[in-house]
Amino acid sequence: MNTSSLSLDQGPNISVPFRFFYSAPIFFILFAIALFFTPTDVIELRFSSQTVALVHLFTLGVLTLIMFGALFQMLPVLMGVVVGGNTISVWVIHLLLLLGIPLFSFGLYFETGILMLIGSFSIAIAILLFLVNITIDVMKADRKGKSVILMQISIVSLWIALIFGIFITLGRAGIIEIELYEAFSNFHIVVALFGWAFTLVVSVSLSVVPMFYVTPEYTPGCRKVIPLIIVAALASFAILFFIYPSFSILAEFIITQGVLMYAYQTMKRLRRRRRKFADVTVSYWQTSMITLLVSVIFWWVGYVEPLFFTLSFISFGIGFLGSLLQGMMYKIVPFLVWFHLSSSGKWDIPTIKEIIDEEDMWVQLRLYQLFIVLFFLSFFLPIVKIVAASILIISSISLLINILSGWRVYSSLR
Amino acid sequence: MSQYISIYLTEDHRHCDMLLAQAEELVVEKKFKAAIVAIEEFSKAMIDHLEREELILFPAFEERTGMTEGPTQMMRVEHNQMRQLLDQLNEAIASENEKKFFGLSETLLIFVQQHNSKEEQMLYQMADKKLGDISADIVERMRDI
């Protein structure tokens, strides 16, 4: 380790993570509105333009924005990697995503090629800028850290997902011809969901679950085996999708082991946490782990009834990733408000628990849980989907109002 | 017993976390008298830990690296923020103000965790490397506090 890289300062300006956190619920609201107007039988068609649009509105607009915001804040703390925090690049990345995601999704949804292309170009540049900002430092980080190897796999996966995503978009727009379109799409999905998002979440969990909830540490065996399983699964997917697609079940079996191990180890730790009092973020983590397990069960049931493949993706994306990231925001936003106020020398300030009303967070969690259940149900009883989407609209507005109270407290006291 | 600075101080972090969690458990059970004692024990462990760093580790690190205004200074600033939170936490438990106590204990724990993470991931690793030849002596002196 080089002494000059040792930076223990206060991290980025509060506006850096906040601009990403506050944009995510707005995309959540847009996603819920789009869901309201999209029939369930269209969502079941995996490659329909409307489904692909909805998926990207959620995965990029909600998940990626929260993950980028969290990474800008957490990389300096967890890995000593200082991301160009206050530089113009953060501003540009955010603006490009803010423009690109709606254009891309709108273009796809209404099959307007030019909007889709402009949107995808904007998103690609934003993700590229983000990656260029952090890749070298993340790859150089000392691998002794418990999150480092997984973080490196995650960043490499985002590069791959981006490259495949660009090819698929060009193919969809008719600019290039892709012979193995389905293999390209499947690999893009697997690398984005497992290589990037799942791996990043596991990486962060290994550090924050024991820290925030005072639980036993994840075992060194678990920390070593999960990255190996992820890499083995991604390599298997790459080979099988492009060469022996009918054997891709082998790679699915491998990744299932990694997912089960992570979910089991995390639930065990949450159950054995020393801080036993009710905490909305713990309930978010538990919801996340339960829906992760449900997604595994649904996946294998899908071989009997293919509808469950769709439900598995929903459980993984909206259940597992969506819940966990909202819970993380409820942990990070109040802390950052307190931290930045306190670091500027102010002491007559609310505690972390007084910044967002706890009752409001519980209500929002219950709404989100209800939405997940009703959304599953809507595939069997389509009329329910309107109720589910309406609840998601209320839940997302409530999420926005809740985290905005963090900003209100900060701006009134700074 | 470890002679590595990083291992010794990381174990000390975990010990403090555990003491705070125990005190929180007592407040949940409304055992305020026992909780006051537990918070006193936690506060002492925390203050001892901060002094181990400020009186022994940081001066040695600064002397060896020449970095007097860098990471150690930032850590000292955060230590002072922790001391103020500790005072407030003791006041809250003395007045049996449960809501305030949990607000402060959550604030302190999350603040301490991000602080610890920076120390464990960077500062202690650096200290192990730069002070390797005298680490046994440093650990021994820190144990005496």
Image (cartoon, coloured by chain):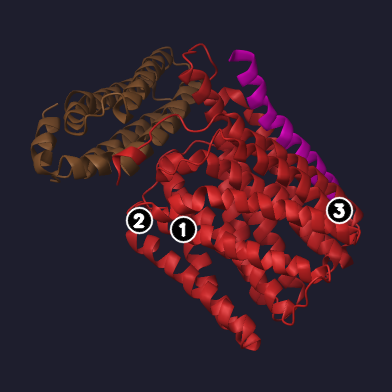
Chain colours: A red, B brown
Q: Secondary structure at mark 2?
A: loop
- Mark 1–mark 2 contact, CB under 8 Å? yes
Which residue is found at the position 58% from the left and 61% from the top? A159
Which residue is nearer to you in this view: A304 or B26? Answer: A304
Chain letter for the residue marked with disc 3 in the picture: A
What amino acid is labelled 1 in the image?
Answer: Gln
Measuring from the top left, give residue A281's x and y in whole percent.
57, 40
Chain letter for the residue marked with disc 2 in the picture: A
Q: Are marks 2 and 3 on the same chain?
A: yes
Q: Quadrant of the C terminus of chain A?
A: top right
Give the image quarter of residue A179: bottom right
Q: Is residue A88 above or below residue A136?
A: above
Is residue A14 found inside the magenta-colored segment of the image? Answer: no
Measuring from the top left, give residue B84's x and y in whole percent.
38, 16
What amino acid is labelled 2 in the image?
Answer: Arg
Distance of label 1 from label 2 (alpha carbons): 9 Å
Distance of label 3 from label 1 (alpha carbons): 32 Å
Which residue is nearer to you in this view: B77 or B83? Answer: B77
Which range is magenta? Answer: A389-414
